[in-house]
Image (cartoon, rainbow, N blue to C red):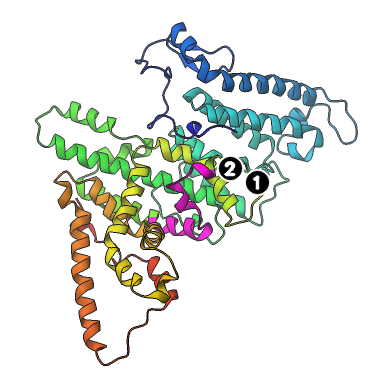
Amino acid sequence: MPDITVYKGPVGPLRHRCPLCPSPSGVSLLRCAGCRAFNYCSREHQVAHRPQHKSACNKIKKVRAKLEQEEHKVRNATEDFMTPANAFETHVGHFWGLIHTRDYMRTRFGLAQELLWLGSLESVTEGLEHMRDMLRLCRGDNMGIRNMIPATMLRLDLDQECYDFIKWWETSGTSSTYDWGDTTLPYLDIHGADAFEDPKFILREFADLNFAVAITILKLKLLIDIRNLKITRKILARRRLPAELRDQIEKEVLRSPLSAKFQKESHASLIETEIKLLGHCIKIGAVITTRNEHFMFNIFHPDEALLDEPRPYSPGSWEEMALAMRYSYAALWETEGVLDLLNDSRACAARDSESEIDDWMKNEKARKGRTAAEFMADLSVNRIWGYLEYALDNASYLGPWSERPSERYTKQNRESWAADMAEEDESDSDDAEYDLDFNAVTAMMDTPRTRGFRGSSTRF
């Protein structure tokens, strides 16, 4: 098992670089002869980094040698009624159906996993190539490789490819009429799908958890790009710069290739796109929470899940969450701004709900022996998607932090809450003592006190 650092490397896009220095562009890098997946700017840095790299390097070197042996066995098998002489020529698409190919497939899967853990641009690129080719060899994907691919694509900023991949598997791939035995049928043939469309195909009851998480990361990535562009334009508006220089600066703050079109959009158009993407995130976030109640809680404390040994799982289980976390967390970590946005959304939910917690803690039946901190921890995660808009507005705000948008919204909500309570107290003045039902409390914890979007008129 790897240590936690394989999931928490440098934040930002993977680059062709030396692990010990920034490696300016244009510098020719030396490739490690052992793993063939790590680069160094000099022999000195390779020697200095050897203690950290040695274990992973030896593992990859060993599994490469084993893969060569297993491939040779498949290509030169003794033919009989169950075993073709060379399955690479006769059984592409159906590899897992041949018993003698399974050691090859398992070994290649192991190599792909080690390469992803290594975390360099070269290793992650090669790992993705292995996984894609394994799907070509075995369309039915008996090993569940498809669950790892979308987040890996996001790490490489292959965002359009990620969306197309998920859409195929969640549409054609789930169709009861698709004949997996017929390799002449189109396979993974969706290209250029609209990543800004309402992702209805992922909102179904039994949507794949890994796919839902990957599309959420993609949508949040686009929202972060919009945030970066809005802030950049605010700052550039104070300077007189040539148009070419302004365009270059704007280009540099956008990470996703899908965001290139944002440069041509007006502020009003950006706001419209932002609201649309925000709605998508809230919808898909609800799917994630419904599919597996453990996932969102563990995003903020992932170490136990990331270091857990993969085990058989049932839908909605802790084990399913742990595997999905292992597949997606590196993409979350490396996509700058996403975890910050989710953390601030959770903080906004907690800040806006303090008075409710105080009320609930006065009621023994509602408390069920739980502390205010425990209530708040649950509530802030359960409401995180409802407060994502607050966090987005905070992220685009350049004024004093004490006057950030979420503070203004919370003040408005508390004033509204106090008015509602005063009106309720007046109407219930003749009633018996109010008894808060615990089930009602639980339902309230899943819902933010705001109602719907604030709309484009209040966005920044």
Secondary structure at badge 1 equals loop
> Which residue shows up at 44% across the image and 68% down it?
369
Whether residue 37 is visible here, answered yes or no, is no
x then y, percent, for residue 73: 79, 24
Q: Nearer the viewer, residue 240 or 344?
A: 344
Q: Is residue 314 left or right of residue 360?
A: right
x then y, percent, for residue 134: 65, 34
Say whether residue 400 is magenta.
Answer: no
CA–CA distance in space, label 1 to label 2: 9 Å
The reply to whether dot 1 and dot 2 touch (C-beta < 8 Å) is: yes
Tag on residue 144?
none
Residue pointed to by mark 1: 311
x then y, percent, for residue 182: 72, 45
x then y, percent, for residue 158: 45, 35
Tag on residue 308?
2
Magenta stretch secondary structure, dominant? helix
Q: Is residue 240 above or below residue 214?
A: above
Say whether residue 284 is magenta.
Answer: yes
Residue 242's quadrant in the figure? top left
Q: Is residue 90 left or right of residue 230?
A: right
Secondary structure at badge 2 equals loop
Q: Is residue 258 left or right of residue 56?
A: left
Task: Give amino acid for label 1.
Answer: Arg
> Which residue shows up at 57% across the image and 53% down it?
318
Task: Give amino acid for label 2.
Answer: Asp
Magenta extent: 282-305
Q: Is residue 296 above or below residue 247?
A: below
